[in-house]
Image: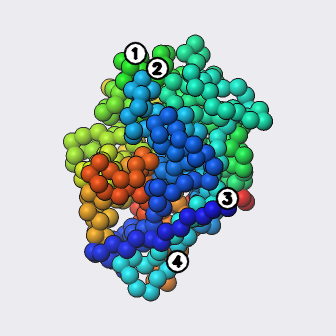
Amino acid sequence: MKHFRLSALAFAGACLFGSAHAVDLIAIGQLSPTASDLSGLSAPLENGVPGDQLGGLGSGLAWAGGSTFIAIPDRGPNAVAWNAAVDDTSSYIPRFHTLNLALQPVAQGNLPFTLTPTLEATTLMSSTKRLRYGPVVPAHQRGLWYFSGRSDNFDASRSSADHVDARLDPEGIRVSRDGKSVFVSDEYGPAVYQFDRATGVRLHAFTLPAIMNVAVKNSMGATEVTSNTSGRVANKGMEGLAITPDGKTLVGFVQSPLIQDGGDGGRANRIVTIDRATGATRQVAYDNFLADMNKAYNSSELLALNSHEFLVLERDGKGLGDDSSAVVKRLYKVDIANATDVSTLSGADSLLPLAVPKTLFLDIRASLNAAGIPDTQIPAKIEGAAFGADVTVDGVVKHTLYLGNDNDFVAVTKGGLANPNQWFVFTFTDADLGGSVFVPQSIGK
């Protein structure tokens, strides 16, 4: 089995080790954006990109115990223009990767730990039931029908709630408590699926509220938006995904407000909880607006602190990969325990008065700036978030928080900047949670 290794980068600049900051950056690591994954699918896709290019690893990130993490890319490389009718998507087979993100303390350096990522396995995602494709049907073997990133792989006559479409745009991933399966959020559906961790075969599809579905599907996202008056915005569907520490509840996050709630750029977002045992759902309103920026920002990830409190990742799309400068990369804390169920409500005017309060937990951009990383080198798409194993820093046991980036499978930006797959590791203590109780997830117990 091939492995790829690259030690953590050392950045010149301010050292956060031993600083007064409550949440500290302790390590940075990366994997080459030109490396191959372990799928063995080296044949070029329609756009000429190798089908096994290792990219987009930070679209979703899940802890699997110890130093093992599961990383998921999205629908595949679509930065190369080749067919606008399918939004330049390709027949890339969605997959998840098993990584070893090994932390090691160092005696000297700008950061107190090194992070050495190792790619250990690549698992393709498939179904034992026939899926509906467009004009391009990928090869299937031994009764498995593989999912596809192409935006035209759907059945226009069937509802997304039927879960027969082959198109899959995975954005969030979490590991079950027994460690045997993974849960994946899909922007296309929108949907949440359960896959066997060992084989990648879909085990179960959770039915999301009907108000999130679009009536008219289209392979072009812009056309799909203008063709519908309700439902999720194209490419802004089920983005973030959390699982409560007891493993009983999945919590999904729509990236932008639904069309009927204001659409992309609006404020009134929705968090949806899913009871794994019964399938029952509950919806909670969330306000994307940031007063200091006088703007609403989309949400990229959701991470459970305990059964009712979560960290929400809000960001702009600026920074490395966009050849611009990062402005907003933040984690906010919310508590949904006593929130009003907004399942029967529609529209921003109805939702916003019921939005859950939020408090800033971590200004990611400010923390990376303090470590000497300029705004032009902060990844534009920091999307994946996961807690990891505790570490000891200066004799104090601290919790770890890992953040990853989606580099869109682009090795070098148009501006000539290297655009690797990166992970940033932060530490925090219970005292940094403002009275909240952190309950780590137990995997395999």
Q: Which residue is mark 1?
A: 227
Front position in the image: 192 or 248: 192
**Mark closest to the chain's N terminus, 3 or 1:** 1
* Mark 2 in CB contact with mark 1 (< 8 angstroms): yes
**Mark closest to the chain's N terminus, 3 or 4:** 4
Quarter of the image where the C terminus is located: bottom right
Vertical order, 418 against 143 (above or below): below
Q: Position of residue 82 (x, y in %)?
A: 41, 31
Res. 74 visible in picture: no
**Mark closest to the chain's N terminus, 2 or 4:** 4
Residue at 49% from the left image edge and 68% from the top image edge = 6
Q: CA distance from mark 3 to mark 1?
A: 43 Å
Mark drawn on residue 104: 4
Q: Which residue is mark 2?
A: 218
**Mark closest to the chain's N terminus, 1 or 4:** 4
* Mark 3 in CB contact with mark 1 (< 8 angstroms): no
Q: Which residue is mark 3?
A: 443
The tally of labels here is 4
* Mark 3 in CB contact with mark 4 (< 8 angstroms): no
